[in-house]
Image (spheres, rainbow, N blue to C red):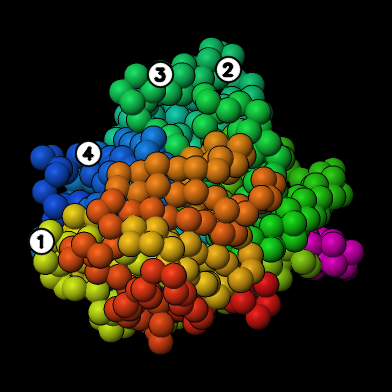
Amino acid sequence: MLTPPLRPGAPFGPAAVLLAFVIWHLPALGLGLTADDLWWALSLHGGEHAAPFDLNYAVAEDFWRDRGVGFWWTSPDLRWTLARPLAGALFAAMIPVFDPRSWAWQGLGIVGTLGLVTASWPLFRRLLGDKTALLALALFAAHPAHLQLVWFVSTHHAWMGATPALLGLVAWIRWRGDGWAPGLWLAPLGVVVGLASSETALGVLPYAAAFEWVTRRPGWRGAIGGVGALFVAYTALHTALGFGVEGSALYLDPRVDPLGAAWGVLSRGPVLLFGAFAPLPADLWLTVPALRPVLVILGLGAAALVALGLRGAWPTLSQAHREAAQIGALGALLGLPLFTVSAPGGRLVLWMTLGSVMVLAVLFGRAWTLWRGAGERRALLLLSPLILGALGGALMIPPQLRVVAGVAEELRQAAEDSELPSPMPPDTFVLVLTLPDAGTALTLIPARLLAGGGAAPDRLIVLSASPTDHRLERLSDDTLTLSLASGRLWDQPMERLFLHPDDLHQRPTRWAREGLTVTRLDDDPDAGPKALSFTFDPPLSDRRWRVFTWADGALRSVDLPAPGQGLDLPWSPGPLPAPGGGPSER
């Protein structure tokens, strides 16, 4: 059985939670555009998008020439084609109106994510009842999974897709559970509208299937079949229209590499579990690779604690709460294959969190009842790590936003201080020898180009973004070598975003790009390159070349040594914490 159909109730509790959500996320205001946001903004300035609906379409040449991402290892086969027409249209409409540093960007993120949290309330009330639903709403609102959706404009598509899809799930449950006739057409409508903004809307389908499996209402097999048919239809249309990400070692495409995608579920799935239950964001998988084994262990440990808690509380739970906990747990687990194809992060943990807070609300509420009624302290002791995790997650949201704001300001200052021409003169070739890390590389140059009106150089090549000292040797007029003092190229996950999987796994020794030939000089086939030779066409003596490197907190102009001579390029920190701590700790 489920809780009774929705009835009007006192709005004060939910209103207080939603108000707290807004206040808690106010430090995000003013962060402005960064990284991916700048890429899409540059594409609009470049004018290659005849219509805003294809905003999230890009191929290798777009990144090399127009987006400020000049990694030489960017795969010529890279295709970044994402079906997000409504989200793209909104972004395109805002670009001419708002400055890149306007409060409007994160203000929209707060309002949009608030709408998503609000849409979860009728779902929680329907499955959990008012008191437990309020606890679930508070847990959901306080979870750090929303951070990325608020401050990172390029993930606004997630709440744009998830909100109508979530309302569609509520309509589905009311139709199937209460016989509410409008739900028959409102449910698929919500999902379709969501999918017009983002593939994130697919995350609602596992919960619809879980509801049918757990409640076993008449026609449940056909209902699950309908959910599956919708997923298959979307996937087929998505593939037929050429959408998807190809040529990136960071993305796992089950159509191309089913074994790799299966391994992604096993290796990245526990990290999403960690993100669903823990006070720290799952984005640590991407930003601090050394923590990945710890995140996996913590994720499995959190899941084990929840399982033990459910097992102990099961005999004392009402039938409605048993069903709600099962729907939450099963929906989250069924969604794992959908959200392990990319790097774990807030937008991917979102749907896991929806299920986890339903389970936690049931457990926390029951533990509190047992403790107050029977003095059963073991229940609270068992769940204390999860309780502390939930509280910690809420308390860490403002500090995390302040850290992000500080980094964003440092990146903006570094872009302003850089000697890269702004605006970019025509007929210019830009060679960047080193940058402090991949994250800085993905933001600094696009920010500088955008500040100069969006004009891009005719050619942009970044040789290295590894956080270590480098040594450059000029062999001839057209050839130089670059060697890393420690570490390897492509050690950072963000470097692999533009790297072809074959380059990562098969370790080629030679790459050909337009006007550039790269040859690997070291002989370790089991790791990324450590020393490389670069041959340029036209030669580096051509007057069109402008050469820069990272020094003293900005991109500085540098003169190349004469043929036969060398140049030391010492590493210095950028605005972002260096993966591995920089050369002294690598």
Region in magenta? 367-383
In the picture, measured across the screen, residue 156 lies left or right of residue 497, that is: left
As drawn, 322 above or below 553: above
Identify the main secondary structure in magenta. helix
As drawn, 129 above or below 394: above
Q: Nearer the viewer, mark 3 or mark 4?
A: 4
Q: Nearer the viewer, residue 15 or 66?
A: 66
Q: Nearer the viewer, mark 3 or mark 1?
A: 1
Residue 211 on the magenta segment: no
Q: Nearer the viewer, residue 252 or 9?
A: 252
Res 510 visible: yes
Residue at label 2? 220
Q: Nearer the viewer, residue 253 or 503?
A: 503
Residue at label 4? 54
The quadrant of the picture occupied by the N terminus is top right
As drawn, 120 above or below 384: above
Residue 377 on the magenta segment: yes
Q: CA distance from mark 1 to mark 2?
A: 64 Å
Residue at label 3? 236
